[in-house]
Image (spheres, rainbow, N blue to C red):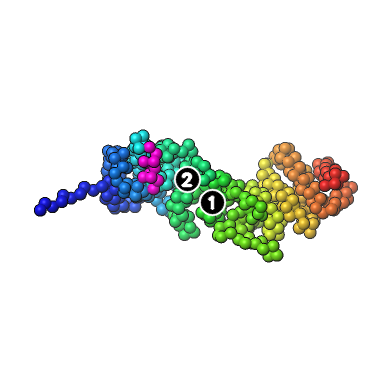
Amino acid sequence: MELESPREPSPGQTFSGLLQRLACQGAPGTEGATRDPAVQELDVLIGGADWPALLRGDPGIPQALGQVTRTLCGHAAPPKGEDVSGAPVPRGSERAARVGAVLLRLLEGMEAAKGSLGPSGVMPALRPAAPHIYLFSVTHCHEHPWTSPASQKVAQEVLALLLRVTDCVSVAEFLRGETEGQTGSFTAVMGLLKPELNKESWKNNPATKHIFSWTLHQVTRPWLSQHLERILPPSLLISDDYQTENKIMGVNCLHHIVLNVAVLECLLDLFPVLEKPLLWKAPEPRPTGPCDDVLQLILTHMEPEYRLLLRRTYARNLPAFVQRLGILTVRHLRRLEQVIIGYLEVYDGPEEEARLRILETLKLTIQHCWPRIPCRLEVFLKALLKMVCDVARDQSLTPEPVKAALLLEATDCLTLLDHCSSGQVTSLLAKAVQSCEDDKVLDCIRKVQQLSGRTTEAGI
């Protein structure tokens, strides 16, 4: 009786063997990883493969490609704990360039196979690998301490070819899908990032925060709403860091979320909740949501902050939160009042961005929370008049258009204060006119009186 000849290994099994060898090369940055013999052998194997035949005949190919790309991309990752302010690491960027060349060859094979098999014959095999390839590309396609011009170029080519093979016209379409109901790769990408985006691990890989931020900003409304529970915690985590760079990055992520998470119709809970939908009965206080948590965190950081760059970043994003919460801003009014008063007192440089944004915030706060404003009238009135006087007497390099914008915003705030206080502001300002000698201040007061008079006559 003849013995059955040994069955030749399938391509999937061949890849598995190479993966084991690749994993034995050592962690990135060690001497054992410099030659990458398994990477070279994998490059040869992928280049010589008959992909149409493999995709038709071996059901293990999708899993094998997922394993290959995961290991390759991990092999090209920046060393853990790398100092992002240091010089580039030549060995790491060279390794990334070699890995990128293998991924290019793989995608070229997929593109050629798509010509004969069509998208339906290729995409099921490529789908497990695509998120890993995307993460590799975003890690290395921009200038960072762990990249070089060569690795950036390869990574950019990989990303461009990935989009072409998946029939996507942009990174945004690759992540979100072509239509609102279509599933893109955003969920898979965030799933791969999740283990690296917790409190203990997010600084281990210097690329993680950049990948998360850049990826997040590619997805806008209406697609972003469904991913809130995946994107909000990392954004809060990064914004709560002690490093200025991370604070700014986190706040910008939060701002993007606020602007692009869809509003729930007919509800004041404008931030979708992370857990199950909250039930609200009219006699009970309305439950807080993620937007409340984010605003509370931002106000906590804003109040003691003295660095102008961060003050401007916080102030730039504050109006969006007040607009989103609407009347529910009253929950934060005490802390918000302290922040507004504190920021109005501080000169912000020639562009006065922080004070302009704080004045915008004050206007929105008065409009949404007007029943609670009269008891704070004196505090806001003093702060606004003090700022008007400071701007009028400002002899610095602040451009005149900026001063005019500040005075105009202050005038609008004073007018709104007068409306919600039944004319108390104009009554108090009438006394100030008699003793004021500054033309700019007088002009501001007269405008408030005129605007209040016109709106009163109109019955508003």
Query: Foreground residue, 389 or 217?
Result: 217
Q: Is residue 168 above or below residue 272?
A: above
Query: Foreground residue, 444 or 349?
Result: 444
Residue at 34% from the left image edge and 52% from the top image edge: 27
x, y percentage for residue 19? 30, 50
Query: Foreground residue, 360 or 107?
Result: 107
User: What's the amino acid at mark 1?
Assistant: Gln
x, y percentage for residue 382? 79, 53
Quarter where residue 379 is shown: bottom right
Comes first in the chain, label 2 or label 1: 2
Residue occupying the far left of the picture: 1
- Label 1's element? helix
Residue occupying the far front of the picture: 1
Residue at 82% from the left image edge and 54% from the top image edge: 421
Q: Are marks 2 and 1 in contact (CB under 8 Å)?
A: no
User: What's the amino acid at mark 2?
Assistant: Gly
- Label 2's element? loop
* Magenta stretch bounds: 118-128
Inspect this view and state whether residue 308 appears: no
Q: Does 369 lie within the magenta span? A: no
Residue occupying the far bottom of the picture: 284
Q: Residues within 10 Å of mark 2 (few under 14, many from 20)?
A: some
| Residue located beneath label 2 in the image | 184
Q: Residues within 10 Å of mark 1 (few under 14, many from 20)?
A: some
Residue at 74% from the left image edge and 51% from the top image edge: 367
Residue at 69% from the left image edge and 62% from the top image edge: 282
Q: CA distance from mark 2 to mark 1?
A: 12 Å
x, y percentage for residue 377? 79, 55
| Residue located beneath label 1 in the image | 226
